Amino acid sequence: MRLDREYGRILLTALLVALTCMLAGVRAGHSEPLVAKFLDKVDVSELVPGADSFGEIRSDIAVVPALKHGQTVGYVFLTSDFVTTTGYSGKPIHVLMAVDANAKVTGVKLVKHSEPIVLIGIPESKIRAVTEKYAGLDLIAEAESGGSAHKLDIISGATVTIIVIDDSIVRAGLKVARQLGLGGLTAELAESGPQKKLLMPSGADVPISDWQTLTGDGSVRALLLDIGQINQAFIDSGDARAIKRPERGNPEDTFIELHLALVSAPEIGRTLLGADEYANLVEWLDDGEQAILVLGRGQYSFKGSGYVRGGIFDRIQIIQGDTAVRFFDKQHRRLGRLAPGDAPSFAELDLFKIPADMEFKPSEPFRLQLLVQRAVGAIEKTFITFDLGYKTPDRYFETIASATPANDVSMQLSGDIAASNPDELSHLWKRIWEQKKVEAAVLAVALILLTGVFFFQMQFTRSERFVYWFRIGFLCFTLFGLGWYANAQLSVVNVLAFFSAITTDFSWSAFLMDPLVFILWFSVAASLLFWGRGVFCGWLCPFGALQELTNKIARLCRIPQITVPWGVHERLWPLKYMIFLGLFGTSLYSLELAEQLAEVEPFKTAIILKFDRTWPYLLFVGLLLGAGLFIERFYCRYMCPLGAALAIPARMRMFDWLKRYKECGDPCQRCAKECFVQAIHPEGNINPNECLQCLHCQVLYQSNSKCPVCIKKVAKRKRFEDRNRIKPILPTDEAAGTASVLAE
């Protein structure tokens, strides 16, 4: 035990020394644009043909000049310095791109992403090839068309990822071109003249119209596409595979009839939704948010099923200027019916919320873009787009004075440049938290329940049967709920990223992007102070739950269990500390390399990607789980770098909650033999670095059938009761009974 403590102190000291050395090299208060981190990943000539070197990052905007013989021939930047569009992962997709003085894109390179769809089955080379095709994109034409002058090259199975990349490239390119004045483009400054604001009457003051009036004045706009138009559009696209598979039916039959209305305008919303639904809409919207109503009928759905699988509506988006708004499932509500008696019936009636941070202007024209797909193979699809334009009638607005001074040009320009500050991502994580509030609430309830278990562990562990089934149930929740459903699997990569962040440009926004993971880390930090690492490792780790549940199935199937000899066991558990220190040291040199080496963790394969990976990864996970069938929690005991990372600070815990008798270990070995991870030393001490807080030893601590100390106490109590048992007194002979009692 003394050697174990010394070993822990050495590890902790080494970690603190390394951290101190890192912090000593941090430049106080300095935060470089993200582009600085990725310049070494590409050669400048890949982005700007003919260029031979990078210049210095400009101080006024996160742009790096590309130089040829010392002269600027282009401008290189990272899309995520200017826009925060996110994909399935909820994280920005980092793309390096360059533009020339004529506002044309000269080169594009995908440098980093966290898209799971690319990690499983779709080659990253295909995504990179599509990205690099944006070289030659004319940003002047994109500015004139609102970002739709080019053809979108969709990859089947990665629709959302490609759309996100496209959106990032176009929007970031336009922002840079405007701020630098490339190709004659100018920065879009706030108007200094009169502004328009929606009239917002309430209650009985909201006027009510009818369907015919709203469609007549443009408050409701429609797009009607028949089968003939769709077939002709695919013919015009020139895709031979699509031409061979025309839509079936008469050319005059309706393919889709689409209607659009801005229902956050009170008269439109009150008329179409009715009093009750409009009141619900007003309550749903926060300050600065707008809402649209999309109606559809015909054989094509504008929703599809992508929102069911990934939570994103990938067939529609709102475009205003060079800003695109794509909707998530949490920004969506279904509508049962339309209120006007003269309104037609529709198969799909859906409300969509436009977040305030999108800076959507209801007084400005916008369009709803519809993505129409056609299968061209067993799993391949091709796409074309159609636009439904919308301009809110002027009668819904009032004129107000501009709140922005005409001469406040620097304030306007800084709004775009500020995107390079990671803290500007705050609106993004807030939106993600809003979308995940139900899952976050469920996790919070589970954590409160688990906290209660540990605070009242002696009461909880009185019944061995109850503890067993409670643990089985909680592990199932951890595996199926936290793991396979919510992907809330913590990783050593999170630890490495945290240390990297605090030495560079730390921002809480980056760690708030995944609500469940953040809540779990917060709970881990708290539990380390009270109980050590075992609360997470033993109860909240999905892969740990998978190991334990599969081992229990193995026991039911009578698979023999191997007890590792103590001498071998205590020499194997330091292996995980070595793995962690190796990854930590690598992260000081290259965090990306450390993330690749962190594949020693099977979490991504088994939990995040649900075994949908290539055979080497599956073989590795299979070997670990196979070993766990014979040696319970094999990976947790000997290989887990995350467990090692948590065990080091856990040595500073404030309390020892697990109760022991002085007889534990000498002579009794019951707990040591029944501890399934062998965290109890032969002399009876519990090693907190290895303990998973399963509480089985506390069940034994109170067991009157297994614990020798408890058995002795019960026997002693029984003998005492036998000696002091009072004989029954017969009412017919009270005096004799009294004498008998006194005699005894």
Image (tube, rainbow, N blue to C red):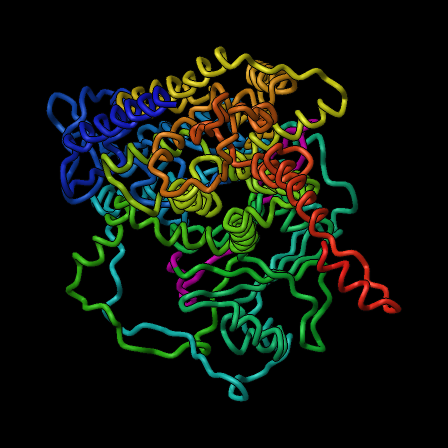
Residue 139, image x and y in percent? 34, 41
Q: Residue extending furthest left?
A: 70
Can you see residue 586?
Answer: yes
Q: Nearer the viewer, residue 617 or 279?
A: 617
What percent of the width, then of the height, locates residue 302?
A: 63, 51
Residue 358 falls inside the magenta stretch: yes
Q: Nearer the viewer, residue 215 or 232?
A: 215
Q: Is residue 305 visible?
A: no
Q: Quadrant of the N terminus?
A: top left
In the visual, does 131 lie left or right of 474? left
Looking at the image, residue 464 lies above or below residue 647: below
The quadrant where residue 671 appears: top right
Q: Nearer the viewer, residue 542 or 605?
A: 542
Residue under the image location 71 percent in, 62 percent down: 346
Find the magenta span and give its range: 357-384
Magenta stretch: residue 355 in it?
no
What residue is shown at x 66% (from left), y 58% (from top)? 296
- Give the image location of residue 740, x and y in percent: 77, 58
Up-down: is 744 above or below 12? below
Q: Among all residues in the image, which is located at the extreme right?
A: 732
